Image (cartoon, rainbow, N blue to C red):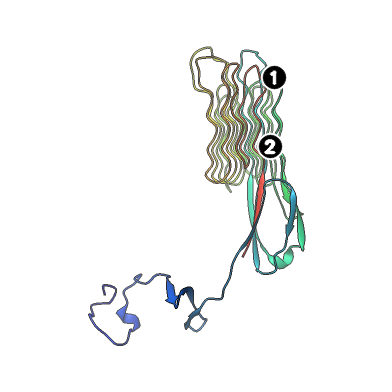
């Protein structure tokens, strides 16, 4: 009995008999079932009350219905990813779209109505050849919260910014990337990569510029899209910005046929960004939830991943 403080036998366990950190939470067998043990306010062990969770998930718009039991609701939502831009064969690779932002809030169940309307933001639709991308839609849970969509890639190589906690990602403009949605979103790429979110870590990453600028990274906002590139030599396109919870940014497209499209930004919890296309070949769409679409050259760009919502009642 190694947890005892130097004693090999005993009939009564005292506080001093148990070494620090030697006892952990466990399940105690009781007949043929298992019971969780908790402690009352006076320190007396007792069987924990039976409990459970109710989880309702929404890949498309719908209605959440309040369960009959529970006290707290964890509401999670992702905005849709922006689509990439297409250069339309102008010897340029199109830029990636920004990833959708992620929001989570805890609510006392009594503050929610018997039902709540869930609107899931669609990913930005693919652009036509030579067209700008489209911003990702916002996901809303009644009037309780909004998860903002990622910015659109511009046809002339400026990538979209990632969605932030209180604003959508900005679209690229010309050769300059779009800034990440606020608060403290990453700066727009101009002469290089987009900036990472700053301060509170809930702004979106900035979109990269047309000099193969990589997208900025974020924690809960969406990653910025990777900028397009016009190089005639073999390169790897600009990477989309990564995110921990939000959608990753889409990778930038490239012009040279021997090159490799920019990789989409990876997300630990959200959807990954799509890969940029090469010359006249397609890239990939952003993944659900909230991944930004890849940019292309000549043909239609890639769509952003749709948003998502999950409400867990405890």
Mark number, residue 59? none
Q: Residues within 10 Å of mark 1 (few under 14, many from 20)?
A: some
Q: Residues within 10 Å of mark 2 (few under 14, many from 20)?
A: many
Mark number, residue 123? 2
Q: Is 167 above or below relative to 84?
A: below
Q: Are marks 1 and 2 in contact (CB under 8 Å)?
A: no
Secondary structure state at the residue bearing disc 2: loop
Res 194 → quadrant: top right
Secondary structure state at the residue bearing disc 1: loop
Res 26 → quadrant: bottom left
Q: Position of residue 65 (x, y in %)?
A: 73, 60
Q: Where is residue 190 in the image (x, y as percent from the top left)?
A: 60, 26
Q: Is 193 above or below relative to 246?
A: above
Q: Position of residue 284 (x, y in %)?
A: 59, 29
Q: In this view, does 133 lie to the left or right of 193?
A: right
Q: Alpha-carbon distance for marks 1 and 2?
A: 18 Å
Q: Mark 1 points at which residue?
A: 129
Q: Where is residue 74 in the image (x, y as percent from the top left)?
A: 63, 59
């Amino acid at each position: 009995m190694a947890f005892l403080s130097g004693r090999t036998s005993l009939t009564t366990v005292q506080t001093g008999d148990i070494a620090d950190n030697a006892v952990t939470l466990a399940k105690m067998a009781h007949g043929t079932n298992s019971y969780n043990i908790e402690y009352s306010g006076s320190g007396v062990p007792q069987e924990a009350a039976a409990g459970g969770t109710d989880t309702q998930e929404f890949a498309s718009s719908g209605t959440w219905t309040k369960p009959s039991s529970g006290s707290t609701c964890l509401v999670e939502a992702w905005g849709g990813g922006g689509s990439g831009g297409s250069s339309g064969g102008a010897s340029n690779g199109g830029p990636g779209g920004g990833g959708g932002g992620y929001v989570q809030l805890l609510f006392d169940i009594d503050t929610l109505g018997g039902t709540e309307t869930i609107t899931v933001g669609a990913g930005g639709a693919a652009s036509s050849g030579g067209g700008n991308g489209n911003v990702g839609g916002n996901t809303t849970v009644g009037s309780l919260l909004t998860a903002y969509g990622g910015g659109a890639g511009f046809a002339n190589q400026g990538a979209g910014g990632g969605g932030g906690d209180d604003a959508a990602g900005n679209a690229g403009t010309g050769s300059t990337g779009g800034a990440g949605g606020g608060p403290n979103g990453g700066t727009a790429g101009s002469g290089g990569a987009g900036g990472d979110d700053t301060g509170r870590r809930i702004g979106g990453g900035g979109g990269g510029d047309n000099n193969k600028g990589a997208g900025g990274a974020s924690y809960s906002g969406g990653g910025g899209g990777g900028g397009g590139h016009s190089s005639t030599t073999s390169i790897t396109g600009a990477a989309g910005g990564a995110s921990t919870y939000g959608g990753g940014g889409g990778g930038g497209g490239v012009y040279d046929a021997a090159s490799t499209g920019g990789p989409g930004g990876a997300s630990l919890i959200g959807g990954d960004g799509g890969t940029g296309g090469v010359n006249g070949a397609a890239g990939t769409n952003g993944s659900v939830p909230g991944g930004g679409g890849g940019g292309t050259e000549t043909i239609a760009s890639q769509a952003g991943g749709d948003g998502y919502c999950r409400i867990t009642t405890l």
